Amino acid sequence: MKYAPLLLAAMIPALANAVPLPETMAPDFETSAVLPDQDKPEGRIVDNFKLSSLLGKNRVLLLSYPKNCTFICPTELIAIKNKLDQFQELGYEVLVLSTDEASMAKDKEASHQAWRLKPDKAGEGSKDTPIGIGNADFIMLSDPQGKILKQYGIQNEDGLAFRATFYIGIEGKVRISDVQSNSIGRDVDEILRKAAAVKFVEENEGLVTPEGWQPGDTGMKPDHQGVRKQLKNKQP
């Protein structure tokens, strides 16, 4: 046991940077953000946005991505923007997070505000210019120092965010934690399905969502008879 203190000391940094597990409270944070504004396509800057300001009123979908004005990232965020009303119908506030600056005053080319002003259509702009995301109605979080990335255990060796998705319940508990390689893009329909599943189990105590569950399906009772009924219904 003489090595126990050394082992514990070695584990502390890893534990401090661990990805929040399901059924634990989502770490709160305060950071600068760009909020949508009907009168300002670039959005409105808020310097002290807090996750906790949403909890108790909304579910939260927190998506991290590596960098503005890159390649996979706009394909994901434009798809999220195009289906944002479906997330809102499920009671979600959507937050997107990267290490980019929020304000054009700090970065005229690749800040959140600047990216929002770039065209989001493939046929607009020259072939060598970044695709933008347009005037999106989600909230864009700025984390230049990587503080939130470290809180959530999603900072890669380059100091950028992994491509992570956290589904946070209405009372602030993490329900799903998904983290993947930055070379693999997310499927927004699958994100929607999981978001709906979180809502379902929060609103239907005593039921779970079995394999293949889709929005509109009934849930399953978590007992042996429930399993038998589910398998019978799935038989071809």
Image (cartoon, grey):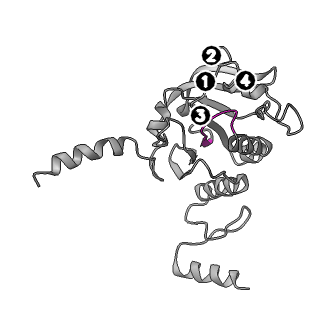
Find the distance from the CA under tag 1 to the CA under tag 4: 10 Å
Query: Which kind of residue does numbered mark 4 sit on?
Result: Ala
In the rendered image, the vertical position of residue 63 relative to residue 35, given as above or below: below
Disc on the earlier residue, 1 or 4: 1
Left-right relation of 188 to 52? right
Residue 117, x across and y down, in percent: 78, 25
> Which residue is label 3 attached to?
98
Residue 93, x across and y down, in percent: 66, 39
Crowding near the residue tagged with mark 3, few <14, some 14–19, many ≥20 C-alpha atoms within 10 Å: many
Out of 42 and 69, give the one closest to the viewer. 69
Query: In what quadrant of the picture does the C terminus appear?
Result: bottom right
Disc on the earlier residue, 2 or 1: 1
Query: Which kind of residue does numbered mark 3 sit on?
Result: Ser
Find the distance from the CA under tag 4 to the CA under tag 3: 14 Å
Judged from the image, the secondary structure of the residue bearing numbered disc 2 is: loop
Left-right relation of 211 to 173? right
Determine the residue positioned at 45% across, 47% down.
19
Find the distance from the CA under tag 4 to the CA under tag 2: 10 Å
> Which residue is label 4 attached to?
114
In the rendered image, the vertical position of residue 226 relative to residue 25, given as above or below: below
Query: Which kind of residue does numbered mark 1 sit on?
Result: Glu
Left-right relation of 206 to 94? left
Question: Would you say residue 66 sits in the magenta stretch?
Answer: yes
Q: Which residues are magenta?
A: 59-70
Crowding near the residue tagged with mark 2, few <14, some 14–19, many ≥20 C-alpha atoms within 10 Å: few
> Which residue is label 2 attached to?
106
Find the distance from the CA under tag 3 to the CA under tag 1: 8 Å
> Which residue is label 1 attached to?
101
Disc on the earlier residue, 4 or 3: 3
Disc on the earlier residue, 3 or 2: 3
Find the distance from the CA under tag 2 to the CA under tag 1: 7 Å
